[in-house]
Amino acid sequence: MTILEEIVDAVSMEARVNAKPIDCEVLRTRQVGALWEVWLAPLQMREHLDESLEGATLWWPGPPKGSADILSVVPDEWQINLRFASSPPPPPGGRLKIYSPQFLESLEMLWQDARWVKQCLRVQNALGGFENNCVGSEPHSPRFPWLRTAQQRTFGLTKFEHGFLWGPPGTGKTTTLGALVASYLVQFPRSRILLLSTTNVAVDQALLAVDDALQKIPQLPQDIRKTCQRIGSHFRAALYKDRRHLLPVVDEAALQRLVQLEASRPDPADTRAYDKWKTAVEQARKALRAKAKDILQNA
């Protein structure tokens, strides 16, 4: 089996595992206006509920068969609250299936792109053989004399095709990354940097570290800080309350509304209040998302 076949097989297998629904028995239900509160019992002991299922879909065979979205989850009570139900959920003793959000389908599609596959395998082969071509430039670190020697050495990572910054929690990886990117932006202002991570929270922390580092550089042209842009609408609005320049399209009303909403998140068990709150959050994020494509093209 080739490396490509192994990777595709692994991604497909993981996708199939994640696609397996959670089978549950309905213990009781309660209608709250157009919403439903449902208490469940898992049919397999390994199953569990958590907040990550918010936004997931579920289906039941009926009669009548139906589907709905999960508005919120109360894990300790094995309770899910539903919206957009196409029919009443099953009565006590009935069965339903919860389908977790699927994120691996896009990855599977990428592995069908021959050009993308070629690039990935080239990097994989280089990593496996410890080949690391010198392709870039290294920014100066004297702008941050307070960095430890090991932190200053990380600036050399930008010279190579790939590099790793490793350290136990609390050793300053995010701070180092902020100083590194800030120095690169100042020394090479025409460069393009894509800063990404596996979670929105990590992106926020890294971008704020870059902005903090830029503020500590003396006689810095203010325009440089404005070149940093937070892409996407799923960010913690409160973090950007005093950093409007990091948000490329600032709808002040929507942003302020989002800050207020984040600070007043109701108990997920309060179905009516949570539904009203979530609808408002979605509307505010939609307003902030409107010109994302333009931002990406001009970044």
Image (cartoon, helix red, strand yellow):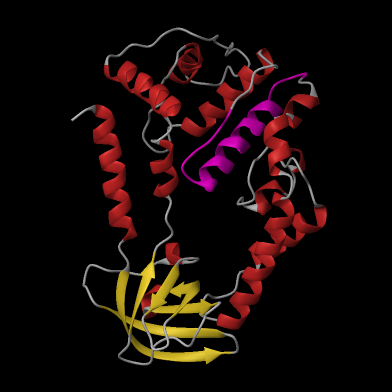
Q: Nearer the viewer, residue 56 or 284?
A: 56
Hey, which quadrant is residue 107 in on the image?
top left
Residue located at (33% from left, 16% from top): 126
Q: Is residue 83 left or right of residue 101?
A: right
Question: In the image shown, does 47 or 292 lie closer to the viewer?
Answer: 292
151 or 41, nearer to the observer: 41
Specify whether residue 203 is painted magenta: yes
Residue at screen point 46% across, 18% down: 154
Residue 269: image x %, image y %? 51, 80
Q: Is residue 200 above or below residue 189?
A: below
For image coordinates 52% across by 26% down, the residue present is: 176
Give x and y (percent) for residue 205.
56, 41
Quadrant in which the N terminus is drawn: top left
Across and down, in percent, residue 260 comes to 71, 63
Magenta stretch encompasses residue 291: no
Taking 299 as reference, is 91 above or below it? below
Q: Which residues are magenta?
A: 194-219
Q: Inspect this view and state whether residue 14 appears.
A: yes
